[in-house]
């Protein structure tokens, strides 16, 4: 049998001579049988046996090497980030539940909505946790207890994630906490609609909405500008005008037929603002009553979606607008939470 190509996999990396060959953790064999069509598994087992024999007969031939972050493959980077996020969310789940979802989103909104596109200041940068003045403002002070709980939770998350990596930023911590609490709230609603617990678990896991999260936000101690956020219960027209200006440069929001919509025009505002209030259902009803032309239709549409078992349309659109909010004025470090990996080198 002639092999066109072959890759042998173990949890380490091997080096033949001076040329490193990185071997990925998952077994994968790519081969082309020319004559006898031997199974890929046979090739894998034979190669693994040869490597094991070499290690047993000549342990001195093996040496470890630290692979720097700059040399990590896309696969390795993705695996490290996924492990970091899973550990962080696992630590947050016992600490935040469905009743915390609205307040956590309110913290995000109040941090992100300070972004000034003209000066590129403010925005979603965790400053609401780091700078006490920002959290003490009248529009934010009612969130102090919840912010204190999140500050305490940071220690639990930092202890849970890979010790090789850096500590989680407050901006990323709040995103993950809001996701964890919101998905638990959604699960609670779905479980009430099913006749059995097992049926509810299937709906929430197998048919759950995917919620990707980009991590790596950099914190800032500089507070965003004060006095930007409308007060709770402000007229809907005032809220809409404010949200339309978030992330938009002065004079850029025109009304022509070819003018791009701002990030948070009426429809995105319907998803974000009420969900950040203490009674989202009542706030949605107020939006539809005060401005039926812009909100009555979308409310009917989302009520239909939320009336289904999977609630897919509502959840997908909420996640899309949430993701925009979580990136508003944010600075990302592309190497955040990555660390070196120990590899094994063999000389044959």
Image (spheres, helix red, strand yellow):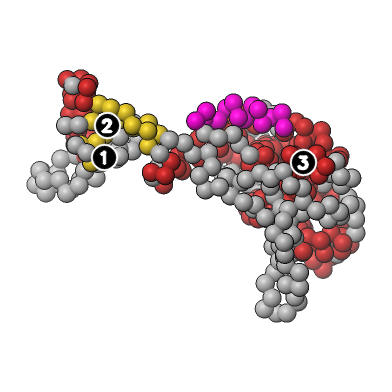
Q: Are marks 3 and 1 in contact (CB under 8 Å)?
A: no
Residue bearing the label numbered 3? 131
Does residue 233 belong to the magenta stretch? no
Quadrant of the image occupied by residue 104:
top right
- Vertical arrangement, residue 308 with respect to residue 25, above or below: below
Quadrant of the image occupied by residue 221:
top right
> Mark 2 or 1 closer to N-term?
1
Give the magenta range. Answer: 151-164
Residue bearing the label numbered 1? 20
Percent position of residue 234, x then y: 90, 56
The number of discs equals 3
Q: Are marks 2 and 1 in contact (CB under 8 Å)?
A: yes
Marking on residue 345: 2
Nearer-the-camera pick, 113 or 166: 166
> Mark 3 or 2 closer to N-term?
3
Q: Give the crowd class for mark 2: few <14, some 14-19, many >=20 residues within 10 Å.
A: many
Quadrant of the image occupied by residue 161:
top right
Marking on residue 241: none
Percent position of residue 33, x then y: 15, 46
């Amino acid at each position: 049998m002639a092999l066109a190509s072959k890759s042998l996999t173990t949890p380490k990396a091997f080096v033949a001579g001076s040329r490193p060959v990185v071997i990925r953790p998952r077994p994968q064999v790519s081969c082309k049988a020319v004559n006898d069509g031997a199974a890929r598994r046979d090739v894998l087992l034979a190669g693994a046996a040869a490597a094991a024999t070499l290690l047993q007969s000549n342990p001195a031939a093996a040496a470890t090497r630290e692979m720097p972050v700059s040399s990590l493959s896309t696969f390795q980077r993705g695996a490290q980030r996924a492990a970091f996020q899973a550990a962080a969310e696992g630590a947050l789940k016992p600490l935040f539940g469905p009743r915390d979802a609205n307040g956590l989103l309110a913290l995000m909104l109040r941090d992100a909505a300070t972004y000034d596109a003209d000066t590129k200041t403010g925005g979603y940068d965790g400053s609401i946790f780091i700078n006490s003045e920002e959290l003490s403002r009248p529009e934010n002070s009612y969130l102090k207890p919840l912010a204190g709980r999140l500050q305490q939770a940071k220690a639990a998350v930092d202890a849970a994630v890979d010790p090789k990596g850096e500590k989680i930023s407050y901006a990323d911590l709040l995103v993950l906490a809001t996701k964890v609490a919101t998905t638990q709230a959604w699960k609670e609603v779905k479980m009430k609609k099913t006749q059995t617990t097992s049926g509810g678990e299937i709906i929430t896991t197998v048919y759950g909405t995917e919620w990707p999260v980009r991590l790596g936000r950099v914190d800032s101690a500089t507070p965003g500008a004060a006095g930007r956020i409308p007060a709770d219960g402000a007229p809907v027209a005032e809220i809409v005008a404010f949200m339309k200006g978030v992330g938009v440069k002065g004079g850029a929001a025109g009304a022509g037929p070819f003018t791009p919509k701002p990030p948070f025009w009426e429809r995105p505002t319907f998803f974000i603002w009420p969900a950040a209030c203490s009674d989202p259902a009542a706030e949605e009803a107020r939006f539809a009553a005060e401005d039926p032309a812009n909100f009555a239709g979308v409310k009917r549409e989302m009520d239909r979606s939320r009336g289904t078992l999977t609630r897919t349309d509502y959840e997908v659109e909420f996640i899309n607008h949430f993701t925009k909010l979580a990136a508003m004025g944010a600075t990302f470090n592309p190497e955040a939470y990555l660390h070196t990996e120990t590899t094994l080198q063999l000389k044959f």
